[in-house]
Structures are given as structure tokens and as C-alpha cells.
């Protein structure tokens, strides 16, 4: 993991879009205030996918596949167990992903989410 996606207040930055222009997209971290500009390619208007995914790891990490170990470091096993208990072979993959998005929103509302003490146990 490169250091450009690390946050001064938390483990990884949590970016929000502040400006979407024809030539670039400007975002800032809601925790540390770091500003990032993603330049768009001429003609297609697309930004660099690798850099965007690297910087938005909190939004793109999944409980399965190649990012499983990072998911477990960030969120622990409890959210994954809850997700599997809810699904238990009754839902399609899309429904499982929707459940996970809802659970992520619930995690962010948890007290202490933005505090540094919450992240001390994450390497």
C-alpha cells in the first residue's frame, strides 16, 4: 500500500467530492483535510482508475477476494459474520452487496467512528 492514501487522523482517508470539472475532479479528506485532484483524460473524461481505487480503499475493500485481508484489518470479523448470517444462502450476490453497503453506513454512525482511539488496534 502506498503512503499517498494514508490519513493523518485515521488509517485511510475518507474523500468527498468538492468539485467536478471537465478537466479534473477535486476531492478532500473529511478527517485530515488532504486535497486530491484527479485529472481526467481528454476525450473520454475518465480519471486514473488505479490511483482512484488506491485512494478510496475504505469504499472499495470487499469481504471476499483479493482485498479480504485488508477488509478484516479495517472492519474485523464481526461485520462479516453478521453479513453472512443475514444472507445464509437466501440471497443473490447483488443482494449481499446491497446488505454490505447498508452495514457500512451503520458502522459509520457508530460512536467513536471518527476518533483515533477506534483505529489504534489496526496496524
Image: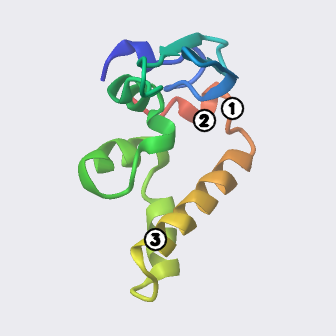
Residue 117 visible in the current orientation? yes
Secondary-structure class at tag 3: helix
Residue in the image at 60% along x and 10% along y: 35
- Mark 2 crowd level (few <14, some 14–19, many ≥20, 10 Å Cα): few
Give the quadrant of residue 48: top left
Give the quadrant of the N terminus.
Answer: top left
Give the quadrant of the C terminus.
Answer: top left
Of residues 58 and 70, the one nearer the viewer is: 58
What is the C-alpha distance between the residues marked 3 and 2? 30 Å
Above or below, comparing residue 90 to residue 92 in the picture: below
Q: Which label belongs to residue 94?
A: 3
**Residue bearing mark 1:** 114
Above or below, comparing residue 34 to residue 102 in the picture: above
- Mark 3 crowd level (few <14, some 14–19, many ≥20, 10 Å Cα): few
What is the x, y in percent for residue 98?
Answer: 55, 66
Residue furthest to the front? 43
Q: Nearer the viewer, mark 1 or mark 3?
A: 3
Of residues 60 and 39, the one nearer the viewer is: 39
Above or below, comparing residue 79 to residue 37 in the picture: below
First-in-chain label (1 vs 3): 3
First-in-chain label (3 vs 2): 3
Of residues 49 and 61, the one nearer the viewer is: 49
What is the C-alpha distance between the residues marked 1 and 2? 8 Å
Instruction: Give yes or no for contact between labels 1 and 3 (Cβ–Cβ under 8 Å).
Output: no
Residue furthest to the left? 66
Instruction: Give yes or no for contact between labels 1 and 2 (Cβ–Cβ under 8 Å).
Output: yes
Residue in the image at 62% along x and 29% along y: 117
Above or below, comparing residue 29 to residue 92 in the picture: above
**Residue bearing mark 2:** 118
Q: Which label belongs to residue 104?
A: none
Q: Nearer the viewer, mark 1 or mark 2?
A: 1
Give the quadrant of residue 46: top left
Amino acid at each position: 500500500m502506498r503512503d499517498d492514501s494514508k490519513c493523518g487522523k485515521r488509517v485511510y482517508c475518507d474523500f468527498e467530492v468538492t468539485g467536478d470539472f471537465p478537466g479534473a475532479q477535486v476531492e478532500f479528506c473529511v478527517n485530515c483535510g488532504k486535497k486530491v485532484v484527479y485529472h481526467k483524460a481528454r476525450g473520454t473524461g475518465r480519471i486514473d482508475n488505479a490511483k482512484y481505487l488506491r485512494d478510496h480503499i475504505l469504499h472499495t475493500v470487499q469481504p471476499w477476494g483479493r482485498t479480504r485481508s485488508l477488509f478484516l484489518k479495517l472492519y474485523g470479523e464481526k461485520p462479516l459474520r453478521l453479513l453472512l448470517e443475514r444472507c445464509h444462502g437466501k440471497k443473490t450476490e447483488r443482494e449481499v452487496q446491497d446488505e454490505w453497503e447498508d452495514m457500512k453506513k451503520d458502522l459509520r454512525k457508530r460512536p467513536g467512528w471518527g476518533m483515533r482511539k477506534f483505529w489504534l488496534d489496526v496496524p
